[in-house]
């Protein structure tokens, strides 16, 4: 009997899926299951499940050598989903639904050639600047799973030549603000009249924490005596667009970092202002788990809110500010920390990055700037 389930896809539409027992694996003796998803109605899913059930009972269900890429994907996904956090599965299913399955879903995985894979990856690289590498990576993972379980004899995806990314994107990747631009940005926010907004941007700019980490902060996470902030959770997006709370992905992400005295002062000011403001709206913000940055009903703010606030300030000032995202506040912090003399290890610890790649990329960018300054200083010293 098939198990029909309702879910919401990345576009917010209701869809149905099913999982069906189709016999026993002759090699392992374990139950063998297959699954399908993407049905618009429960009736469609039920009919498809009934057809498969009939094929399974009569022995006419597709053999392993005819198995579709999409079927293998669903088998792989059941294993993969147990190894990552929900927010990651949301992104991965989005990649498959929007890009990978349209290219290969209805093809027998054994018949997908290296040429077909190379053509798809080439097309993806022209469609987007960078994500095509991830799409290729996950496509290769499905083929690797198929090889592992015996559906195919070799993995042609390992032979694909991945196109180099557009150089212009590499330049955009290193776009962040200077010290003067950051200071100028804060001149557009009144620290008293817009205390919450000012404090949120101050925390992002002076600690380098991620947007989701910032929105998950509670007053318990701030030690005013020791001037520290503990990062132990993050707001992220789960299935169906629902906001969920997750722990950091790595042990390095869970950390306690120092807060400068000025930022601490803004936090204190906002705490008192929040108590008065939310009390008028009927909320007691003295509870231990009170969010520092809450929405109007004292819940988690939307992940989009900081970005909206940012662009409200900078969008009509293109001559004053390079257009950046909220995440670039983190890169700006990294850049300015290096300019102030911090070491790679110190910055990596503050950011909670287990992987030092991003930190090193910013460091390389700053180093080039410092090398130019050193060269100019030497020329002035020589005075020739």
Image (cartoon, rainbow, N blue to C red):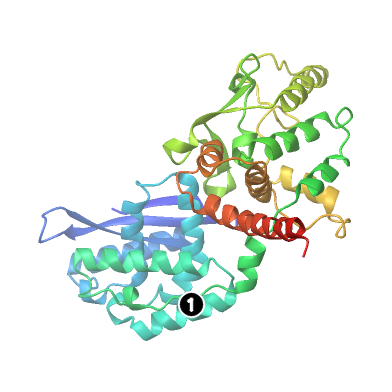
Q: Residue furthest bottom?
A: 115
Q: Position of residue 89 (x, y in %)?
A: 45, 51
Task: Write down the quadrant of residue 52 in the picture.
Answer: bottom left
Which residue is at a point 51% across and 31% down the rendered structure image?
255
Q: Position of residue 216 (x, y in %)?
A: 60, 32
Q: Nearer the viewer, residue 363 or 324?
A: 363
Which residue is at a point 22% across and 70% down the rendered structure image?
151
Q: Nearer the viewer, residue 31 or 295?
A: 295
Name the element at disc 1. loop
Task: Write down the quadrant of residue 156 in the picture.
Answer: bottom left
**From what the image shows, is residue 164 above or below residue 207?**
below
**From what the image shows, is residue 355 above or below residue 155?**
above
Which residue is at a point 74% across and 35% down the rendered structure image?
202
Task: Write down the quadrant of residue 160 in the picture.
Answer: bottom left
Left or right placement of residue 255 versus residue 370 in this view = left
Q: Nearer the viewer, residue 75 or 13?
A: 75
Q: Position of residue 254 (x, y in %)?
A: 48, 32
Query: Badge 1 is on which residue?
Result: 163
Q: Is residue 12 visible?
A: no
Q: Position of residue 305 (x, y in %)?
A: 73, 43
Q: Is residue 357 visible?
A: yes
Left or right placement of residue 295 versus residue 210 in this view = right
Instruction: Quadrant for the C terminus, please.
Output: bottom right
Disc 1 crowd rating (10 Å Cα; few below 14, some 14-19, many 20+) is: some
Q: Nearer the viewer, residue 103 or 189?
A: 189
Which residue is at a point 20% across and 64% down the rendered structure image?
149
């Amino acid at each position: 009997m098939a198990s029909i389930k309702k879910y919401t896809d990345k576009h917010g539409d209701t869809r149905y899926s099913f999982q069906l027992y189709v016999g026993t694996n002759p090699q392992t003796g374990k139950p063998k299951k297959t699954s399908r998803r993407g049905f618009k109605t429960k009736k469609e899913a039920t009919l498809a499940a009934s057809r498969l059930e009939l094929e399974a009972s009569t022995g006419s269900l597709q053999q392993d050598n005819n198995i579709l890429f999409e079927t293998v994907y669903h088998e792989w996904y059941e294993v993969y989903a147990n190894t990552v956090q929900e927010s990651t599965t949301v992104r991965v299913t989005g990649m498959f639904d929007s890009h990978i399955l349209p290219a290969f879903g209805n093809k027998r995985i054994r018949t997908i050639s290296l040429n077909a894979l190379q053509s798809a990856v080439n097309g993806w690289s022209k469609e987007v600047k960078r994500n095509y590498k991830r799409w290729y990576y996950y496509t290769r993972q499905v083929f690797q799973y198929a090889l592992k379980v015996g559906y195919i004899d070799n993995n042609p995806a390992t032979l694909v030549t991945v196109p180099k990314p557009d150089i212009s994107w590499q330049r955009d990747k290193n776009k962040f603000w200077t010290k003067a631009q950051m200071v100028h940005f804060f001149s557009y926010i009144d620290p008293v009249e817009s205390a919450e907004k000012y404090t949120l941007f101050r925390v992002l700019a002076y600690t380098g924490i991620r947007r989701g980490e910032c929105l998950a902060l509670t007053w318990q996470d701030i030690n005013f005596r020791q001037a520290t902030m503990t990062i132990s959770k993050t707001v992220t997006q789960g299935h169906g667009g629902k906001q969920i709370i997750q722990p950091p992905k790595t042990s390095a992400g869970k950390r306690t970092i120092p807060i400068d005295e000025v930022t601490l002062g803004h936090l204190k000011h906002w705490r008192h202002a929040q108590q008065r403001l939310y009390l008028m709206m009927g909320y007691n913000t003295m509870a231990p788990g009170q969010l520092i940055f809450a929405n109007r009903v004292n819940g988690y703010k939307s992940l989009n809110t900081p970005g909206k606030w940012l662009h409200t300030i900078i969008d009509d000032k293109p001559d004053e500010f390079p257009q950046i995202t909220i995440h670039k506040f983190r890169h700006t912090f990294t850049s300015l920390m290096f300019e102030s003399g911090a070491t790679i290890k110190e910055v990596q610890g503050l950011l909670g990055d287990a992987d030092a790649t991003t930190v090193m990329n910013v460091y390389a960018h700053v180093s080039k700037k410092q090398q130019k300054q050193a060269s100019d200083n030497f020329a002035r010293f020589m005075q020739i």
